């Protein structure tokens, strides 16, 4: 088991100030972050089967464009190459959760204005 890093102590030692988290959004580092998130969150059900996030209690239909589904399938295959099993729609759920966290009321107002014009 890896020891936890004390980021406050590291920042102080470097003469820096912590100002929040940095999240990778795409490219190589974003893909590594996605792999790490799947590994950390997905657990196999007690009775067996494909791993999933135990916090996911809701199931809904999600309409997708074919190109979106194709990209999710590609991402799912890439995860598989890293030894991580995730279906295309599990990848979609993770990406959707990430996106929703970053949306605020101002963003919603901008979307509404853009949609109305």
Image: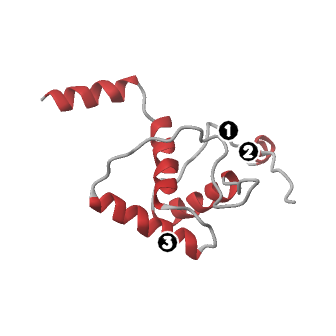
- For marks 2 and 3 on the same chain, the one whose residue lies earlier in the sequence: 2
Q: Which residue lies furthest to the left in this view?
A: 117
* Location of residue 1 by image quarter: bottom right
Above-or-below relation of 114 to 1: above
Q: Residue at x 50, y 36 (%)?
A: 101
Dot 1: within a 10 Å radius of its alpha carbon, few (fewer than 14), some, or many (20 or more) residues?
few
Above-or-below relation of 16 to 36: above
Q: Residue at x 41, y 61 (%)?
A: 72
> In this figure, which residue is indicated by the disc labeled 3?
77
Distance in Å between CA atoms under marks 2 and 3: 37 Å
Instruction: Check contact, mark 3 vs mark 1: CB within 8 A.
Output: no
> In this figure, which residue is indicated by the disc labeled 2?
11
> In this figure, which residue is indicated by the disc labeled 1?
17
Q: Which of 91 and 61 is in front in this view?
A: 61
Q: Which residue lies furthest to the front in this view?
A: 47
Q: Position of residue 11 (x, y in %)?
A: 73, 44
Dot 3: within a 10 Å radius of its alpha carbon, few (fewer than 14), some, or many (20 or more) residues?
some
């Amino acid at each position: 088991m890896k020891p936890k890093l004390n980021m406050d102590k590291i920042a102080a030692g470097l003469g820096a100030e912590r100002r929040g988290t940095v999240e990778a959004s795409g490219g190589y580092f974003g893909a590594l972050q996605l792999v790490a998130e799947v590994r950390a969150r997905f657990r196999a059900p007690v009775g067996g089967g494909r791993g999933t996030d135990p916090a996911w209690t809701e199931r809904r239909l999600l309409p997708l464009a074919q190109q979106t589904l194709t990209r999710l399938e590609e991402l799912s295959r890439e995860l598989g190459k890293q030894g991580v099993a995730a279906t295309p729609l599990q990848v979609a759920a993770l990406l959707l959760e990430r996106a929703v966290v970053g949306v605020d009321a101002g963003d919603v107002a901008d979307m509404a204005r853009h949609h109305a014009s």
